[in-house]
Image: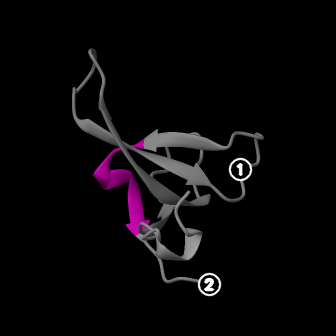
Amino acid sequence: MSDPASVPRLQRVQIVDRQHPHFEEYGRFTGTIITMKFGTREPMAEVKLENCQHGSDGCFVRKDEVNAVPER
């Protein structure tokens, strides 16, 4: 098993798209990218959520739905 301190932490973000169900929530990219087979077919990145008001531990976002935020 690898040392957790040696695993790089990916960017922390805030969801800023008012139409996204997790608007204003914070999280960190996981490194997983998907492309939906319907809709815009734009790549979406998985975000592990820190403070989901719905009880979800993660969601997927498009690049225009998030802003990078500083580390806490």
Counting from the top left corner in percent of width and height, residue 59 is at: 53, 40
Per the image, label 1 sits on a secondary structure element best described as loop
Kindly identify the residue that appears in the image at 22 percent across and 26 percent down.
Answer: 41
Nearest the eye: 46 or 41: 46
Counting from the top left corner in percent of width and height, residue 16 is at: 47, 59
Amino acid marked by disc 1: Cys
- Pointer 2: what residue? 72
Kindly identify the residue that appears in the image at 22 percent across and 34 percent down.
Answer: 42
Farthest residue, direction front: 1
Query: Would residue 20 be visible to someone looking at this image?
Result: no
- Pointer 1: what residue? 52
Kindly identify the residue that appears in the image at 52 percent across and 62 percent down.
Answer: 2
Does residue 29 show up magenta in the picture? no
Disc 1 + disc 2, Cβ < 8 Å: no
> What range of the chain is rendered magenta?
61-67
Task: Say whether residue 5 is left or right of residue 61.
Answer: right
Residue 32's disc is none
Does residue 63 show up magenta in the picture? yes
Rendered image quadrant of residue 11: bottom left
**Mark 1 / mark 2, whichever is N-terminal:** 1
Rendered image quadrant of residue 40: top left
Q: CA distance from mark 1 to mark 2?
A: 17 Å
Per the image, label 2 sits on a secondary structure element best described as loop
